[in-house]
Amino acid sequence: MNDSQRAAWQRLSDRYLVDGLPRGVMTPLFVGQAPLDLDALFGHRAPLLVEIGVGSGENLAAVAGDRPAWNLLGFEVYEKVLGSTMSRCERHGVTNVRLICGDAVTGLRYLLTPQSIAELQTYFPDPWHKTRHNKRRLISEELAELAASRLEPGGLWRLATDWPAYARHIRAVFASPAIEPLFEDVWPGGAPRDEVRPLTKFEARALAEGRHVTDFVYRRRP
């Protein structure tokens, strides 16, 4: 962490961070445990939006401000960027965000119950270009099946990537009877961009380098 990230972590972790969750020794993976009590965690019951890979929090803070009546839970494995996320959430004045430092796959499996998520968001996951590294990709058939079980009927999963090969991979992974694509029949090349999602430096650089961003929206079948 740099000095500002460290200061934000020390000042704001009690407000935003969900800590003390059992996990494997020296790993980001969570182990079997009682799921989170979301009503107690947020102080009230509300629709839950989960973002996998919050980075420095641009999207999470924007969505939290746009949906003040929702609860937002963000997963991220890097402590330093979570420091930036906490600082951003404070600047935006959002109070409906909680953050978990750890693996999102085991987090979904052990920390959240079936049909507890109203919306899931995953933007620009690492594409792992080399064939021998493809198995490391976050988006997989295993995750799609797990996430489908955690989404409520009709719940949405929004994704985006700036790599064509990963876009093809996402389409192949979501050829599942549990989840159906929206917009693909009427919106060539993917789904319309979510107008709430801010244009981050990462996405702006991809566009400047000539890479097309493909958005996806999938829905949990009833």
Image: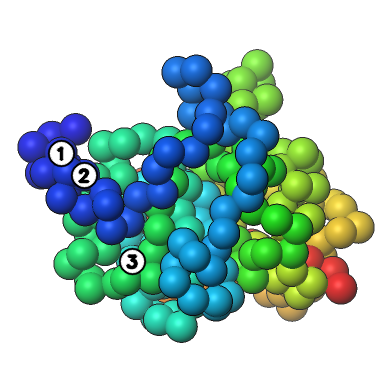
Name the foreground residue: 28 vs 168: 28
Which corner quadrant holds the C terminus?
bottom right
- The residue carrying mark 2 is 9
Q: Name the image quarter holding residue 20.
A: top left
What residue do we see at 63% from left, 50% from top? 35
Numbered disc in front, either 3 or 2: 2
Q: Name the image quarter holding residue 214.
A: bottom right
Q: Answer yes or no: is residue 219 visible.
A: no
Q: Position of residue 220 (x, y in %)?
A: 78, 66
Label 1 environment density (alpha carbons within 10 Å; few <14, some 14–19, many ≥20): some
Numbered disc in front, either 3 or 1: 1
- Left of 25 or right of it: where is 156? right
Q: Are discs 1 and 2 less than 8 Å apart at CB?
A: yes
Can you say whether 108 is above or below 16 in the image?
above
Q: Residue furthest right?
A: 177
**Mark-to-mark CA distance, 3 and 1:** 19 Å
What residue do we see at 17% from left, 67% from top? 91
For badge 1, the amino acid type reads Arg
Name the foreground residue: 123 vs 88: 88
Which corner quadrant holds the N terminus?
top left
- Left of 108 or right of it: where is 123? left
Label drawn at residue 6? 1
What residue do we see at 70% from left, 71% from top? 155
- Left of 199 or right of it: where is 105? right
Label drawn at residue 61? 3
Which element type, helix, strand or loop, lies under badge 2?
helix
**Mark-to-mark CA distance, 1 and 2:** 5 Å
Can you say whether 126 is above or below 200 in the image?
above
Mark 3 and mark 2 lie on one chain; the one further toward the N terminus is 2
